[in-house]
Image (cartoon, rainbow, N blue to C red):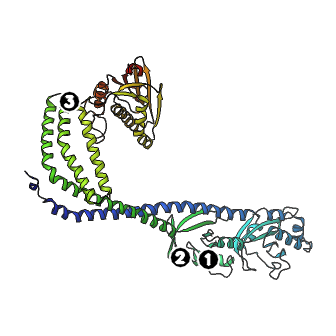
Amino acid sequence: MTQQSLPLKTYPARQAARPSVAIILISITTIAIGLLFFVSLTYFKSLDREAAQTRLLLYKRSLNDTIERYQHLPFVLARDPLVSGALSGSTVDALNPRLASFAREAGLEAIYLMDRSGLVVAASNFDKEQTFVGQNYGFRPYFKQAISGIRGNYFGVGVTTGRPGYFVSEPVRDGADAIIGVIAIKLDASELQQTWENGGENVLASNPDGIVVLASNRDWLFRTIEPVSPARLSTIRQSKQFGAIAVEPLEWTRPDGASVALGERTYIYAGSQADHLNWKLHYLLSEARAYERAWLATIVFGSAISLLVGFAAYQRSKRIQAALLTSQSDRDQLREANRRLEKAHSELARSSKLAALGQISASVVHELGQPISAFRNYLTAEELVGNGISHPTLAKLNAVAARMENITRQLRFFTKPGDEKIERVMLADVVSGCMELMQHDFELAKVQVHQHIAEPDLAIMGNRLRLEQVLVNLMQNGLYALQEASGDCLTISVSRSDDAVMIAVEDNGSGFGERQLNQLQEPFHTTRASGDGMGLGLSIATGIIKEHDGTLSAQSLPGGGAVFIIHLPIAPPIDALAS
């Protein structure tokens, strides 16, 4: 059968299948990008929620500190003799300047004294146009609380000044411990309000009725974020808590516990109860930032995914094309090789594994030689056509061809063992060469390698490449055992033992279990997953050691792990070789 007997009838079918493959790849890429956006958005929202909680705690601490700073002052003033004396008939001429100096030093808007009816008899702003003196605040809740004997705390808009403030009141008692009046302070909330506005963030505080009393946005002030009953609104108007301001609802909805819709915008939400007045603090962080970062991550990684998928599809197309072109000339030879391999497999079942392995090796080396050579020729021709420009695909195919040639060279061991050059080999050089080959694998697996070479000049007679092949195989086996058992240490020792050299490769991995060394040395025996190895490593290594008149032994260690020990005849002194 000639090469022309292999028509390219598969091309139309493959070309017809390509649109379906393209649709599948586009669909998978689209789904992956969609999932990437969803995961990114969820991740960045979680970061923003953590940031919102942190900022909320800062605002809560600031509010609590502001309110707690003056809690003690009415208590102290209520025990001032001038205060109680002013309510017992004494003059207030000395008390007014005293209250004014206290308010100025404390940074308060006002300090004022009321009799039992709520009439202000003395105030720190006695000399101001909007003085509290002569005003009656008996209707205020903080006065009612204090006149009943308990400290009053209240937030509202001042009836006289029209400015919102925080009020703290304390009952004033005479010598008989009877309540004769109330002393109160007013903390101007405008300073804290201005601080929140200047912060450039979205934060607000609501009272137990759900009415916003402080906010970084003035448009939100004195509006409700929760339903308020008509009866409660009537009570609020009677107490003049917010003056003449009409309390109206704010466009505030809570889709879930982690977000708030305010008008047409949605925010990431964090809330916490304040320590005073049963207020609640609310911190809002715009979701736009999370969406921006999620879109940016999606664009960057989505582009990378698209490029990788496109490149993989392109590589796949090139591989298929190259495979089709190569198969046209090599198909007959591969069929013959398969026939011989099947025959060798039948013989392997009737004879020993090593004998059958030798036949298979000879057949594979012989039959794959021409296809590999042809493969090399095609690659060379393609490079010549490219005017010396090396394509990444050609470089990868050259590496594949080199790998195939390396495999055939290893298989020749079973057909023509023992024809390599024998010379004096320094074991330190052998260990060093193996470490260069395996260093990257050890670093990638985070395995520590310890070397113990008792005498740097220990040498044997043999072939260095073959010995490195043995040692690399043992190190690879040890690395696999470490990964299987999460071990992290491999030790290579070289020492003298009488007239022999001992090389030990020890690991703290999974060990051999119930298996014996003679089982591990059987061809095709492997403990690795399918595709990780052929199970020929120890079989080849044992053959190489026997060629060098040595022995290979192994044992499991009591604490876990295993050790392979090689004994080889020590090389005679250089003087003896010269004579």
Q: Residue at x 16, y 32 (%)?
A: 348
Q: Position of residue 417 (x, y in %)?
A: 25, 30
* Residue 23 position by quadrant: bottom left
Q: Position of residue 21 (x, y in %)?
A: 25, 62
> Helix or strand or loop: what does disc 1 sit on?
helix
Q: Position of residue 474 (x, y in %)?
A: 36, 32
> Please, what is the three-letter code of the amino acid marked with disc 3?
Lys
Say whether residue 560 is visible. Answer: no
* Residue 409 position by quadrant: top left
Q: Residues within 10 Å of mark 1 (few under 14, many from 20)?
A: few
Residues at circles 2 and 1 in contact by the CB criterion of under 8 Å = no
* Residue 459 position by quadrant: top left
Query: Residue beneath label 1, please?
Result: 233
The number of discs equals: 3
Query: Residue beneath label 2, please?
Result: 251
Q: Specify which label sits upstream in the sequence, 2 or 1.
A: 1
Q: Nearer the viewer, residue 66 or 441?
A: 441
Q: Residue at x 43, y 34 (%)?
A: 432
Q: Position of residue 146 (x, y in %)?
A: 76, 67
Mark closer to the observer (2, 3)? 3
> Helix or strand or loop: what does disc 3 sit on?
helix
Q: Residues within 10 Å of mark 2 (few under 14, many from 20)?
A: few
Q: Residue at x 85, y 71 (%)?
A: 99
Mark closer to the observer (3, 1)? 3
Find residue 353 and name its label.
3
Q: Nearer the viewer, residue 145 or 112?
A: 112
In the image, residue 360 sits, relative to residue 327, either above or below, namely: above
Taking 162 as reference, is 475 left or right? Answer: left
In the image, residue 411 sits, relative to residue 186, either above or below, namely: above
In the picture as drawn, the residue positioned furthest to the top comes out as 498
> Helix or strand or loop: what does disc 2 sit on?
loop
